[in-house]
Amino acid sequence: DHYLTIEGSHFNFNNTNKNTFEEHYLDANMNSLSLDPKLEYQETTGLTQSNTVQADFALPMKKGSKLEVGWKSIFRESDSDLYYEALNDSSGNFENDITRSNHFVSEEQIHAAYSTFGMQREKLGIQLGLRYENALTNSELITSNETFKNTYQSFFPSAHLSYSITEKSDL
């Protein structure tokens, strides 16, 4: 019998980390090279969301052959903000360290269509397939105002042969 399946999923991840560091400079013998440790503060926030939709259809055909086709789409969004502060010894205040802070945002879509045809003839099994993928990625380094785009299309052919040597052994 033929069948159609449709699936969907959603993934959401949020996190925030706050850390305070003391940075000590040591020589090879582990002796301190500075009297005052360097104090730093780091805060990282991140959000990742992913949504997937997939549909598959299988159609058994005559003489033990089967055609399968499907579609899968993935939609991802990511936002990662890394914020660093270092203690200014003169003022006694923490100040933003722009050389180590970074805010990165990206959006990605991957769409794939695929098909396989398989058949079994006595002891010989054959399966041929083709997958087409289209990916679109947009990213931005907000801190430095840089944007990146990457779009590509690819084909992935496949072939699989099997031969039944015995009832329990295939080659």
Image (cartoon, rainbow, N blue to C red):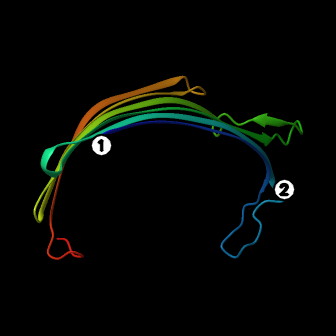
Looking at the picture, which amino acid does disc 1 mark?
Asp
Q: Quadrant of the C terminus?
A: bottom left
Residue for point 21% across, 45% down: 66
Along the viewing direction, whichever of 136 and 163 lies nearer the viewer:
163
The residue singled out by tag 2 in the image is: 36
Q: Quadrant of residue 115?
A: top left
Q: Nearer the viewer, residue 19 or 161?
A: 161
**Helix, strand, or loop for circle 1?**
loop
Q: Label 2: how many residues lie within 10 Å, few (<14), some (14-19) or many (20+)?
A: few
Q: Is residue 157 visible?
A: no
In this picture, residue 58 sits left or right of residue 11: left
Position in image of residue 5 (x %, y %): 41, 38
- In the image, residue 1 lies at what x, y percent? 30, 43
Q: Residue at x 11, y 66 (%)?
A: 123
86 relative to 161, above or below: above
**Can residue 103 be seen in the rendering of this structure?**
yes
Q: Against 119, is 24 above or below?
A: below
Mark 1, residue position: 1
Q: Earlier in the sequence, mark 2 or mark 1?
A: 1
For label 1, the crowd category at 10 Å Cα-Cα, with few meaning under 14, some 14 to 19 and many 20 or more, is few
Q: Residue at x 17, y 77 (%)?
A: 166
Q: Secondary structure at mark 2?
A: loop
Residue 26 versus residue 88 in the image, above or below:
below
